[in-house]
Amino acid sequence: MTPEQARQFRDDVLNIVSQIPSGHVTTYGTIAAWAGWPSHSRMVGRTLRYTPGAEQLPCHRVVNKEGRLAPGWSRQRPLLESEGVQFRPNGYVEIKKHLWEPEWE
């Protein structure tokens, strides 16, 4: 990935995350695929963690493909619960019920 591609990837990731509606989640892998880099799900996580200003976005609505929350982020679950997101007994999001996919034009 060139520096220009990395900037575009970052911008695409932030744009996608900004659109996730309240009460829904999407996955790192899905965001990576929508951004055109389907094998870069870990880079989505790094982008959200290290981009200044990303904390203003609904980053708490991004989970892994099983619905697992980000490790070490104790505020993620309460934020999701306050939006009505439900969890399975194992602590993972009810992904089938809350998964969001954008409607691209």
Image: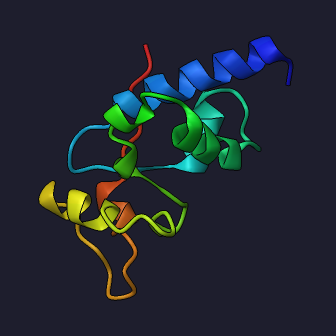
Above/below status of 103 relative to 68: above
x then y, percent, for residue 89 = 32, 88
Which quadrant: the C terminus? top left
Where on the picture, by quarter, is residue 67?
bottom left
x then y, percent, for residue 9 = 66, 23
State the residue at coordinates (29%, 66%). 77
Above/below status of 90 relative to 92: below
Return the residue nearer the eye: 69 or 36.
69
Q: Is residue 3 left or right of residue 31?
A: right
Where on the picture, by quarter, is residue 30?
top right
x then y, percent, for residue 71 = 51, 69
Which quadrant: the N terminus? top right
Above/below status of 57 relative to 105: below
State the residue at coordinates (39%, 44%). 59
x then y, percent, for residue 34 = 59, 31
Outermost residue, right side = 2
Colouring mode (rainbow / by chain / secondary structure / one colour): rainbow
Q: Is residue 17 left or right of residue 21?
A: right
The answer to whether residue 21 is visible is yes
Return the residue nearer the eye: 29 or 45.
45
State the residue at coordinates (48%, 27%). 14
Return the residue nearer the eye: 27 or 82.
82
The answer to whether residue 102 is visible is no
Outermost residue, front side = 52
Q: Say how many tags the image has.
A: 0
Where on the picture, by quarter, is residue 16?
top left
State the residue at coordinates (53%, 60%). 64
Above/below status of 33 relative to 36: below
